[in-house]
Image (spheres, helix red, strand yellow):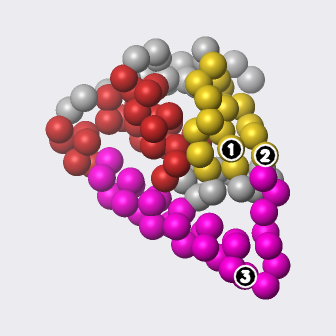
Amino acid sequence: MSPMRLAAFAPFFVWESLRGGVDVALRVVGPSLRVRPGFVAHRLRLPEGPARVSFANCVSLLPGSLAADLEGDELIVHLLDVGTDAGLARLEAAVARVYGVALEPRGD
């Protein structure tokens, strides 16, 4: 992990943390409770090791998300609304840049 790459990640982390807090607050105090909680499996593209663990630890900064379990190449994530894009792929790419690692190609 490079200190310069980590410094470049800091604004992303701060912005997503703030955005996440506001999003969750608006969902639960608004006139209609906009939640459809559930679990999703995110296929990890980061290699095993510190980058993957850091990604799992950072998932909770995304709006309405919480890393629940790490099972092999899948991260199980609890979402407040399973119908939304939680930004997991964007976060994974940001963590990959911090560690200077390439993401494995998608197997879709």
Occupied quadrant, residue 71 = top right
Query: Which residue sits furthest left?
Result: 3
Q: Which of 78 and 42 is in front in this view?
A: 78
Residue 28 position (above or below residue 12): below
The residue that appears at 55% across and 72% down in the rendered structure is: 22
* Mark sitting on residue 33: none
**Amino acid at dot 3:** Gly
Q: Are discs 1 and 2 less than 8 Å apart at CB? A: yes
Q: Name the residue under label 3.
A: 30
Q: Mark 1 points at which residue?
A: 78
Secondary structure of the residue carrying numbered label 2: strand
Q: Which region of the structure is painted magenta? A: 9-37
The residue that appears at 78% across and 52% down in the rendered structure is: 37
Q: Residues within 10 Å of mark 3 (few under 14, many from 20)?
A: few
* Mark sitting on residue 38: 2
In space, the residues marked 1 and 2 are separated at their CA atoms by: 6 Å
Q: Which of 38 and 87 is in front in this view?
A: 38
Q: Are discs 3 and 2 less than 8 Å apart at CB? A: no
The residue that appears at 59% across and 24% down in the rendered structure is: 70
**Amino acid at dot 2:** Gly
In space, the residues marked 3 and 2 are separated at their CA atoms by: 20 Å
Q: Is residue 79 left or right of residue 60?
A: right
In space, the residues marked 3 and 1 are separated at their CA atoms by: 21 Å
**Amino acid at dot 1:** His
Quarter of the rendering occupied by the N terminus: top left
